[in-house]
Image: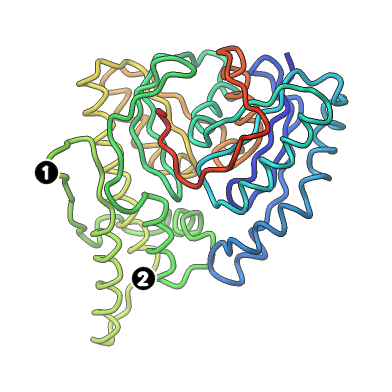
Amino acid sequence: MKILGIESSCDETAAAVVEDGRVVLSNVIASQVEEHKIYGGVVPEIASRRHTEAICGVVEKALSDAGCTLKDIDAIAVTYAPGLIGALLVGVNYAKGLSLSTGIPLVPVHHLRGHIAANYISDKDVKPPFLSLVVSGGHSHIINVKSYTEFEVVGRTRDDAAGEAMDKAARTVGLPYPGGVNLDKISVNGDENKYKFPKPKVADSPYDFSFSGLKTFAVNLVHNASQKGEVVKAEDLGASFIKAVTDLLCSHTMLAARDVGSKEIVLAGGVSANSRLRRVMLEECNKEGIKLYMPELKYCGDNAAMIASQGYYEFLAGKRADMSLNAVASKAIDK
């Protein structure tokens, strides 16, 4: 069964063809990073326009690279939530047009479910149930994945997402967009014990995160040093900040795994590409006899192969959409 996936939730216009939820036949991405770098972050209006310009060519190339035509496609899977509303609408409306004109079934896919599914195409052994840590620029969740289409939120951020906090810290020390990626690169040469960040806790939930205080601590640290004429080395602050964030992500996830009784943990989302997070999670899982799965780096960021993969399982579960399908900017993964 071949699924055409379409993804346009932020600043990547993507299309892919995936067979039986696991085999990637094509994966095409048109990135807008260089354009948004000028502004220090994603400009929603520009992102929407670029999606409109790119989506036809991206889908055509995905079909061509896979050696397919639309007649070979069994279903069209599209990201409909969550994300930038204007960007989502481009992908949703294009997918609806394809479905209406061809009669191919339309399958709506939640973006975070797609990130988890990136592991299905990276490692054929990954199968629910398992616990997943989903971390990106806009989301930080610990999710109990009971089946391919059944999800339970165990923990979540109460304020900023981990990726958002890393981007802010990167901007504070003068690093260009995308901040989190560049912060990770320079932190390799930094002293992660140079600065002692607080360890925020959420009183009524041991699994929930709070990253806004870490972000504020980093900003104040740099500003106070500047007022005193002192220099804060970007690599030291970056390494210390990433340590603080990843230690929280790791400790909360391991606690949840012990309490839930899960012996398998899956990383997902853009921040799952962070080198320290991957290393520390692997070390901790090895200590506790837990199997850790991580997506290939090329599938950590937004892509359509993960949407097509999850779309396959949603299709098998009977999920369909008609022409009333709309984009949704914010939507829980378990709804």
Q: Residue at x 26, y 44 (%)?
A: 209
Secondary structure category for the residue under label 2: loop
Q: Nearer the viewer, residue 313 or 116?
A: 313
Q: Which kind of residue does numbered mark 2 sit on?
A: Lys
Q: Position of residue 229 (x, y in %)?
A: 28, 87
Q: Residue at x 28, y 53 (%)?
A: 211
**Badge 1 local density, few (<14 within 10 Å), some, or many (20+)?**
few
Q: Nearer the viewer, mark 2 or mark 1?
A: 1
**Badge 2 local density, few (<14 within 10 Å), some, or many (20+)?**
few
State the image quarter where residue 61 is shown.
top right
Above or below, comparing residue 219 to residue 188 in the picture: below
Q: Position of residue 9 (x, y in %)?
A: 59, 46
Most distant residue in the front direction: 324
Q: Residue at x 64, y 45 (%)?
A: 8
Most distant residue in the left direction: 203
In the rendered view of the protein, which quadrant contains the C terminus?
A: top left
Q: How many marks?
A: 2
Q: Nearer the viewer, residue 59 or 325?
A: 325
Q: How is the image coloured?
A: rainbow
Q: Which kind of residue does numbered mark 1 sit on?
A: Ala
Q: Position of residue 262 (x, y in %)?
A: 30, 17
Name the N-terminal-most of marks 2 and 1: 1
Q: Position of residue 60 (x, y in %)?
A: 85, 38
Residue hosting label 1: 203
State the image quarter where residue 227 is shown.
bottom left
- In the rendered structure, the answer to whether residue 303 lies left or right of residue 255 reads right
Mark 2–mark 1 CB contact (< 8 Å)? no
In the rendered view of the protein, which quadrant contains the N terminus?
A: top right
State the image quarter where residue 118 is shown.
top right
Residue hosting label 2: 233
- Cα distance, mark 2 to mark 1? 33 Å
